[in-house]
Amino acid sequence: MITVESIARRVVEACEAEDMPHMVTGAFAFNYYGIPRSTKDVDLVVDVTGPKKIEMIIKRLESHIEFGAQVQFDTLTWGRRHIGQPKGHTQVQVELFELFDDPFVQEQFQRRRRLFCDQLDLHTWLPTAEDLIVQKLRWGRSKDLDDARDVLAVQGPETLDMNYIERWCTAHGTAHRLKDTLGSLPPL
Amino acid sequence: MLSAARCELSRAKLPDCESGCHLLPFPEMSNPHDHPTALKDLQDSIYREKVLRARAMTPEERWQAGFEITNEVGGRLLGGAMWSLQTDDIDAGWAEVRRRMARLRKVHDHGRYVTERPAR
């Protein structure tokens, strides 16, 4: 069985080798800030706004991960997603999201943090806890709302830049989700 | 409203039911589903424990736990698939896991992803 960390390592290594600015998102980022849970995806945002092309990453990974030719668009922001299936025994797939000109996505990417991950044995980039919360509230699926609640609960609103979170939630029209999520937290 | 007989199963005696008492959240023999407040208290208690456990971990430990859970889930998915196929063929088991995951993703992605962007 291929472990999820070995898949993540390959993708991050490919980004590093191609000097492609990137940021790991999804459960990988969530687990750093929230309540550990399983995932079915390794998600990365990659900056293809410069000279680097996503095909370079896909090409570098092709002996281990097979990407479909068909790009997908999310219906919320119209960001582009590329899906890759690792070659081997795993339930996990790889999702590469292209960085694009959405103001929040841009700011989230600019604010990302560089961290060393022992399990990957390399440095990688993660969104801040605040940006992860804003992103989860924006997507608004039940799983996303649970994740936003968990990060708020584990980190504690008192340690977070709530003005920043409120500003983006207002811009996204998701202030009510933030309010509801905060209201759902039991006393800790 | 709880019946007096049912409420007698509870050791707690508080003013809030037919017999003049009220189930505490988790008294012996009581069922928290019978009482909205007790159920919410139980949910909050379980959630609080999860949060406090996560808070007691370092971010790196939470990362590690996430990896371990995911890999464990993979093994369990494989076991379930092989059992339902009644096979010892690991390749067939993983093929079934992937088929099931593809179906699950299709459901989760429905309405969220499309393969063509509408013209602006």
Image: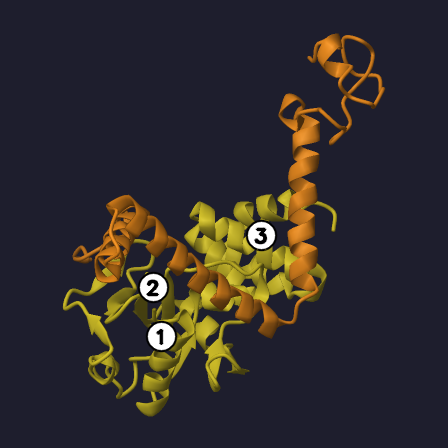
**As drawn, A159 above or below A53:** above
Residue B100 - label: none
Amino acid residing under circle 1: Ile
Q: Which residue in the structure is indicated by mark 2?
A: A92
The one nearer the camera, B74 or A49, is B74
Total numbered badges shown on the rendered structure: 3
The one nearer the camera, B69 or A175, is B69
From the image, state the color of chain A.
Answer: yellow
Return the disc, 3 or 2, that comes first in the chain's sequence. 2
| Mark 1 neighbour density, 10 Å: few (under 14) some (14–19) many (20 or more) | many
Q: Secondary structure at mark 3?
A: helix
Q: Position of residue B44 (x, y in %)?
A: 67, 42
Spatial CA span between label 3 and label 1 = 28 Å
**As drawn, B112 above or below A1:** above
Q: Is residue A91 left or right of residue A175?
A: left
Chain identifier of the orange chain: B
Q: Secondary structure at mark 1?
A: helix
Residue A149 - label: 3
Q: Chain letter of disc 1?
A: A
